[in-house]
Image (cartoon, helix red, strand yellow):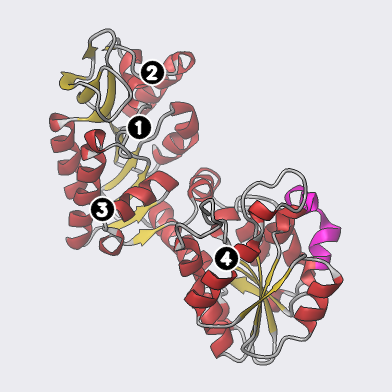
Amino acid sequence: MKTIDNLSFENKRALIRVDFNVPLNEAFEVTDDTRIRAAAPTIKKILEKGGSVVLMSHLGRPKEGPTNKYSLKHIVADVSRLTGAEVMFADDCIGAEAFAKSAALKPGQVLLLENLRFYKEEEKGDAGFAEKLSKHGDIYVNDAFGTAHRAHASTAVIAQFFAPEAKCFGYVMAGEVASIDKVIHGAEQPFTAIVGGAKVSDKILIIEQLMGKANNILIGGGMAFTFVKAMGGSIGKSLCEDDKLDLAKELLQKAKAKGVNLYIPTDAIIADNFANDAATKHSAINAIPDGWMGLDISTETIKTYREVINNSKTILWNGPMGVFEMSSFENGTRQVALAIAEATKKGAFSLIGGGDSVAAINKYKLASEVSYVSTGGGALLEYIEQGSLPGVRAIEA
């Protein structure tokens, strides 16, 4: 794998595709700087190696061209603080001013371009747009794993305008690819995948892919109730995809045929309303009374899941066990997070991916106690499903 460690950046401009799609509050302040923090080592290293840096990213989903709400100018101070470099800003990514600024860069300087998605050509993967962007750098560095599954101009198309020896991965991309490869292609067994979230339909492909690799698959979150109903259980008014009941039965049969242990929760914390202050009680997951809904896994399931996780050598976690944003229904997710941290301490390799799982690991301050926290939820899932990504293939070509 070719990374920034393999190239010389002396007096060269590195055009880095970063993922600075960070949340902003109403005052346009960054409320979570995880993604900027993740890219900082790549930026710092290139500056240390005598290069200059041009940063390009998207922010949000602007519908009609330039919009103040989605301007990257709001994050300049944060990028500067986290990289320790003075960051200049160009208010257009392919305007004359932007090209003048990038052409004049001296070693040690950093320029941030305006939001790529202010141009529809970015998401269309337009080659002409990609070629214009390529003029900002001598070396192309892809460090935006979160967008590597999109065949966009700045992630997959732009690489063709750089010679093979002038394109590489940044540290974020390299770490992500190495960690996922370790789980998918070199997993030490027992390998346990924990898959949660609201809908089975969102996770069909990943569950099917994991059946060929994992020894255990632990199901949690709202999607569990589709499986429970498919098995003939009563789930009250719990979340359920009635049009996916046959699919859930099929997945259960496939797991059995492949000798994979597919664990479905056996008990739940149920509530009479979707609210933190709702009345709650414990119930067998297949005997939830009418008018009640399951919002978290409960004691028996937690005990089983903890035991499986504890005996695992490789762990992949994607998706919460319940509505962990509400304190009344967070215990299942928290217990799973703690179990993963304990298993990691004993020598297991643990990969956490997907927005909610990452949010949970951060919420319980366990990020430093697991092996790797992925920055790209959709990209991680697609990598597992497809075996590669457009942004990865573009560098490896």
Image-based side of 220 in relation to 386, left or right: left
Q: Which residues are magenta?
A: 119-132
x then y, percent, for residue 88: 67, 77
Which of the marked residues, 2 or 3, is nearer the chain's N terminus? 2
Name the residue tied to disc 3.
364
Image position of 351 (left or right of 7): left
Q: Earlier in the sequence, mark 4 or mark 3?
A: 4
Earlier in the chain: of badge 1 and badge 4, it is 4
- What amino acid is found at the position of numbered circle 4 in the picture? Ile
Query: Is 4 drawn above or below residue 232 in the view shown?
Result: below
- The image quadrant where one finds the C terminus is bottom right
Disc 1 target residue? 258
Q: Nearer the viewer, residue 108 or 204?
A: 108
Q: Judge depth for marks 4 and 3 and give the one in front.
A: 4
| Disc nearest the viewer among 2 and 1 | 2
Does 264 sit left or right of 358 as displayed?
left
Q: Quadrant of the N terminus?
A: bottom right
How many neighbours does mark 3 have within 10 angstroms: few (below 14), some (14-19), or many (20 or more)?
few
Give coordinates of residue 166: x percent, y percent: 70, 78
Classify 283 as above or below 91: above
Q: Name the residue beneath numbered marker 4.
A: 75
Q: Residues within 10 Å of mark 2 (few under 14, many from 20)?
A: some
- Asked if residue 346 is among those painted magenta in the image, a careful observer would answer no
- SS under mark 4: helix
Count the numbered circles shown. Answer: 4
> Which residue does the numbered mark 2 point to in the structure image?
249
Q: Give me the C-alpha separation between circle 2 and circle 3.
A: 34 Å
Q: CA distance from mark 1 to mark 4?
A: 49 Å
Locate residue 178, reporting x and y percent.
Answer: 45, 64
